[in-house]
Structures are given as C-alpha cells and as structure tokens.
C-alpha cells in the first residue's frame, strides 16, 4: 500500500517534469501573475529573443505603482510611477497576456485578484514576482514568489527549477475567540515560533481554527507565511474554498467545474502522512495582536506589556529587541493601549478584502476618526462590492479617505507614505525600519484593530469597543 501523502507532496509530484542529480526539480507552472515591477523579466525575455510560452496562463496588473487617488493614466501626476504602469500595459499588449489595467474593474493587488478572479485554484502551481505570493496557498495550491530572472524563465518556458523544501505542519487547536482574526493567528504564530521558523520549509496550516477561518482570514494567514520565513503556506481546500471560487471568471465551468471539484476533494493531506516538523498553536489563547518593534515576531497580545529585552536569554535577540525599542520610541513594560497613533492604513494584500472591510466598518459605524485614516480596497471589484453594501459611506462619514486599489502604503512606491517620525496602525505585513517612509514607525494589526485605533486615536483593544454596543 502506498504511503499516505500530504497535499504538498501530491501537488509537487503532479508538477515535477524532471529531477536533476543536484536535487533541483523542473516544475510545470500553471499560472504566472506579473505586476508593474516586472519590467526586468520582460526585458530579459526580449534580450534573449524569446516569447511568452503560454500567454493565456499569464496575467498582469499594475499594483505596486498604481495611484490610489487617480484611476486613469492621464490623471497620474507621478510620471515615474505612470511609466511603470504604462510599461506593463505595453508588455502585456506585445506578448498577448491577460492584462487588467488601471481602468479595468478587475485591477487590484496581484494576491487579491488571483483568488478573486479564480486564476488561483486548488491543486495548481502558481508563481509571481512578489514574496507574498504565499497568499494563494490558502486556496490549496503551491504558490511562491520568484525573482526577475526566474520570471523571465517562466515566461519563456512555463516551468521553473526549484529544490523541494521540507514540510512543516502548523496545527491551530481550540477555537478562536471574539475579535480574533487570521491576522492575529499569523502574528501569534510568528511571535511564538520566530520570524525564521519556516526557513527551508513549506507550511501546511491545519486544525479546527483553520477550518473556522473564512477564506479571507486564510488568505491573510498564508500571506504572512513569508514573514515566518517560509515561501509556501498551504491550506487544504474545503467547501468554503469551493464556494468562494464558484462562478469566478477564470474558474472552470459546467462539466469541467464538476470534474475539478471532484479532483480538489482528493487533495487534502491523508491520515498518517509525515511532516519534518510539527508546530502546535493554541487558538483559544490568541487575542487581538499588535507589533511593538521592527519585526513581525515583535508581536504581543494588545493586553500585554511590551517585553523587557533584559529578560531575553539570547544575546542576538536581546540586542535586536533593544534596537527595535529605540527605533519605535517605546519602553519595556509599556502598554500599547497607552500609545497614540498618527495615521491608520487599512489595505495591502494582507488585509484589503471585502470581509476585512466589513469587519472594519462594524467598528467604525457611527464614529468619527481622531487621526488621518485611509482605506485602499484590494481590487476594483472589492471597492465596487463595498460601495454596493454602503461600506464606503460608513467610512467616509467617519472621516476616512476612501481610495482606489493598489499596494499603496504597504510599501509606498506610489507615494502613499507616512511623514517622517509618524507612527501608524497598519494592516500590512511588514513593520521593518522605514517600510512606510524614512524614520516612520509601523505597527501591524488586524483591520478591526486598525479601525479601533482610527476612532480612538490610540492603539485600542477592539473588543472593548464592540462589547459596549
Ligand atoms: S501589498 Fe505589499 S506585500 Fe502585497 S503585493 Fe503589494 S507590495 Fe507586495
């Protein structure tokens, strides 16, 4: 009898074309997504006089440089950013790939539109030139970020050389409490295990709390996998996955849909399959989380005091904690609920989906913001859906800046940045030094926690606001 297999092994084996003696495997790539920073890959393709092997499986959208205030090219005043957006459109046109331009309702952040449009499906192998490509794994596929030369190789051959990673299972036991989201699970995992715990591994998330999460929450968790050091974060598909994909533009239709669903049901890890490493996270003990330092592993429950570096036995970690506290201007023992914020950002491929906006709107409804706050929905379709539900009115009535979609203040390539010295509550994924602008201080939180900070002007346990209603 064949040994039981993990979902990762099943997908990997189905895509392995050949394995070299040095351990590298050539893998078939089902889908390739590109953004407006992918011009180097097209340049390399052109320089080698090659063309795109499977244009129909190749998708492009401008997200990194997209303006969140203007939605037509002619209105874009940042000419450097506009050039990048135009370049992607020209490359897409030249090579005949799918392109969702600035004015297309399907435009959005690569890791938001993949699942939303059904480009991302269970069982496939997907690549994109952004490290947060781990996001798509929440749909039950292998997905990982690649560099420009690898992207050029995928464009030309629809395949990629990779070394098979080891396997880690993260089982989230118990039940998630009130106000706890996928973002909190991700931060709690990284705080418990470190930002390097996944290096060299593909992670599979499992357990009752993963089943409990909606698809948006799972996408957030898989998105943050790269912040745990792993490039791949899978979640087995279930009825929620199937419902999420049904009817989406690039999902199979008719008889093909029925056959696909049948195949997807065979994907989950089989009983007894072995992992190289097992991690258990008790979901019942997770509270709304917040980062206090300059790494996602510098995360605590909102109710906890900032840890004292002197209590850290590891010399390297202790010094990193001290440097982080100096940078963020905070003290050991301080409560984050005593710290005021300058700006609030709700957006990025981590937390800009419709469910994220609904959670934030629930907190904001009937309140006024105390600090400058903005929302950038993850795609044109999400913005449209939010407007159909009246969420935009809730946000604008409260004083939020309601923007168009794009990577925006996650990385600020489009000019959406904090001012020097400012502190933000941000739903993005990285709180590294200077991530949102020179000498700025980023604190990672869930959308509900960001909304709570917006209406109180300081970091707040969102549960205290919700309980009062
Ligand atoms: S939102 Fe941030 S992490 Fe996500 S694709 Fe854009 S730049 Fe990358």
Image (cartoon, helix red, strand yellow):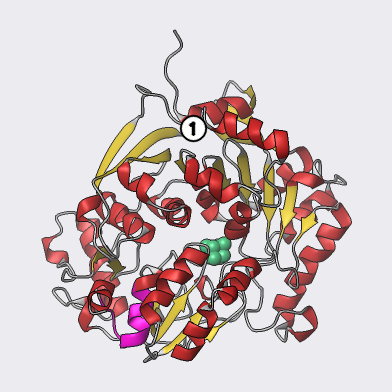
Q: Residue at x 40, y 44 (%)?
A: 199
445 above or below 286? Answer: below
> Is the stretch drawn in magenta largely helix, strand or loop?
helix
Quadrant assignment, res 253: top right
**Closer to the camera, 405 or 341?**
405
Residue at image coords 68%, 47%: 32
Question: Residues in magenta?
Answer: 449-460
The answer to if 20 sits in the magenta stretch is: no
Q: Is residue 243 shown to the viewer in this render?
A: yes
Residue 316: horizontal and vertical position, in percent?
25, 57
Q: Residues within 10 Å of mark 1 (few under 14, many from 20)?
A: many
Judging by the rendered image, the residue that carries numbered circle 1 is 8
Look at 44% across and 89% down and name the residue there: 398
Lateral position of residue 322 relative to residue 386, left or right: left
215 left or right, relative to 43: left
Query: Would residue 406 be visible to someone looking at this image?
Result: no
In the image shown, does 431 or 111 lie closer to the viewer? 111
């Amino acid at each position: 009898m064949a040994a039981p297999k993990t979902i990762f092994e099943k997908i990997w084996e189905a895509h392995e074309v050949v394995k070299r003696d040095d351990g590298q495997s050539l893998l078939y790539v089902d889908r390739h997504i590109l953004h407006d920073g992918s011009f180097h890959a097209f340049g390399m393709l052109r320089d080698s006089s090659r063309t795109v092997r499977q244009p129909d499986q190749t998708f492009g959208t401008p997200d990194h440089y997209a303006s969140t205030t203007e939605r037509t090219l002619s209105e874009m005043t940042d000419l450097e950013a506009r050039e990048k957006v135009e370049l992607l459109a020209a490359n897409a046109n030249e090579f005949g790939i799918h392109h969702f331009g600035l004015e297309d309702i399907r435009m959005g952040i690569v890791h938001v539109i993949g699942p939303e449009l059904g480009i991302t499906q269970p069982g496939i192998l997907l690549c994109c030139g952004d490290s947060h490509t781990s996001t798509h794994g929440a749909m039950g596929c292998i997905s990982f970020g690649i560099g420009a030369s690898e992207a050029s190789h995928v464009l030309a051959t629809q395949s990629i050389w990779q070394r098979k990673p080891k396997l880690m299972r993260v089982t989230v036991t118990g039940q998630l409490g009130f106000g706890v989201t996928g973002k909190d699970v991700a931060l709690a995992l990284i705080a418990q295990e470190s930002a390097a715990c996944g290096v060299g591994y593909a992670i599979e998330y499992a357990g009752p709390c993963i089943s409990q999460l909606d698809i948006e929450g799972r996408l957030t968790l898989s998105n943050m996998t790269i912040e745990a050091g792993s490039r791949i974060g899978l979640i087995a598909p279930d009825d929620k996955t199937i419902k999420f994909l049904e009817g989406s533009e690039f999902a199979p239709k008719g008889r093909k849909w029925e056959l696909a669903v049948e195949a997807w049901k065979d994907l989950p890890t089989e009983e007894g399959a072995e992992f190289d490493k097992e991690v258990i996270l008790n979901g019942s003990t997770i509270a709304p989380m917040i980062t206090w330092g300059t790494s996602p592993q510098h995360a605590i429950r909102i109710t906890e005091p900032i840890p004292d570096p002197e209590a850290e036995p590891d010399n390297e970690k202790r010094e990193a904690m001290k440097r982080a506290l100096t940078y963020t201007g905070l003290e050991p023992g301080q409560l984050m609920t005593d710290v005021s914020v300058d700006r609030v950002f709700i957006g990025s491929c981590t937390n800009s989906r419709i469910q994220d906006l609904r959670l934030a709107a629930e907190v904001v409804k009937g309140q006024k913001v105390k600090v400058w706050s903005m929302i950038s929905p993850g795609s044109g379709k999400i913005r449209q859906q939010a407007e159909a539900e009246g969420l935009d009115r809730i946000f604008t009535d409260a004083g939020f800046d309601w923007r168009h979609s794009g990577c925006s203040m996650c990385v600020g390539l489009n000019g959406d940045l904090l001012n020097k010295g400012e502190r933000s509550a941000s739903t993005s994924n990285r709180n590294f030094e200077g991530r949102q602008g020179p000498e700025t201080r980023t604190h990672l939180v869930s959308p509900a926690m960001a909304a709570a900070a917006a209406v109180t002007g300081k970091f707040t346990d969102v549960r205290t606001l919700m309980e009062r209603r």
